[in-house]
Amino acid sequence: MRPSRAVLNFTHKCAMSCDWCYVPFGTPPPTLVMVNRIISRIAELGFNSITIGGGDPFQYPFISDALRHANSSGLFVHVDTNGRNLRQSATNLSLIEEAVDLIGLPLEGSKSQIHGQMRNSPNHFDLVCRRVKWLSKLRDRLKINTVVSALNANNMLELGELMKIIAPARWSLYQYWPLGPAIRAATKHSINDSEFAECTSILTATTKNSNFTLEINNRESRRESYPIIHHDGKIFVHRAFPFSEFTSLGNIFDSNALHLINSTCSGERPQTISRYSTRKQNAMI
Ligand code: SF4
């Protein structure tokens, strides 16, 4: 199966400094012209969905144009943000309503202290809660992302209770993965496969009748599944071995880019297929 989704990551900078961030920052700033060319190329190569992330995409004033371009290119538009630059304005709410199919915000703990420890940011929990409240009328496209590590694993039950109140469309759990720069946090955050499986299987039981989809992503499931394209056009995938590195696949504008992607990436993992078959595709039926 060929991948139907491409990730576009801004690798310039981020205002936060999460220890376990896998994005290798330091690329020169992005331009709208280049970002829109990459989006057009992703659509031209036959991808159905795009996930836009990296350092907060909303830190760039041009992001509204890029999101609208992705939407009008026929892509299912998923954007992940830490929320810091996502101002609670009527303009941004309209933008999301018009051009974004799925918006991801992070929560790593049920309380400010745990989330703040995970994100190295004491006030970020309150900010995310404000953004969640502001987006309440768009809950059908809200996704909460949680990195699960040794530091917050024993808070998952309480976080599950908070999810029942927030009621996002989807709650995605990600096993901490010492990928790329994230390896610096291995001592603090490593959680082995059986510990991750144990804490997430309890959640499967306790959130069974909740009004959100629980999505569990262990480290293995994400390897070599989709291309990650940096805002300068370079393509990377998570490497199967060694598991902490990326494989470079050249540039999205190379004539053999699609061939390399299709021969390296296995496609969407089973637990995420339903993420990208919601609002836009339903509207087209
Ligand atoms: S995980 Fe997200 S918020 Fe944290 S440093 Fe990386 S891009 Fe920024």
Image (cartoon, grey):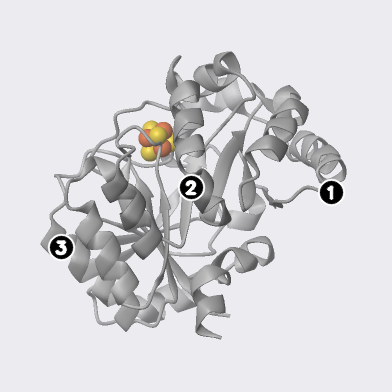
In front: 212, or 11?
212
The residue identified by callout 1 is 208
Disc 1 element: loop
Residue located 85% across and 38% down the image = 202
The type of residue carrying mark 3 is Met
| Side (left or right) of 217 relative to 237 | right
Q: Nearer the viewer, mark 1 or mark 3?
A: 1
Is residue 72 depicted above or below 57 in this figure? below
Considering the image in quadrants, where does the C terminus appear? bottom right
Q: Nearer the viewer, mark 2 or mark 3?
A: 2
Q: Quadrant of ligand 1?
A: top left
Disc 2 element: strand
In front: 71, or 240?
71
The type of residue carrying mark 1 is Lys
Snapshot quadrant of residue 153: top right
Is residue 266 depicted above or below 217 in this figure? below
Q: Residue 61 got which mark?
A: none
Snapshot quadrant of residue 12: top left
Between the residue at mark 2 and the residue at mark 1, the CA separation in whole angstroms equals 21 Å
Residue that lies at the very extreme toward the right in this rendered image: 205
Q: Earlier in the sequence, mark 2 or mark 1?
A: 2
The residue identified by callout 3 is 34
Between the residue at mark 2 and the residue at mark 3, the CA separation in whole angstroms equals 24 Å
In front: 41, or 24?
41
Residue located 64% across and 21% down the image = 151
Q: Is mark 3 within 8 Å of ligand 1?
A: no
Q: Is mark 1 within 8 Å of ligand 1?
A: no
Q: Earlier in the sequence, mark 2 or mark 3?
A: 3
| Side (left or right) of 70 relative to 136 | left
The residue identified by callout 2 is 104
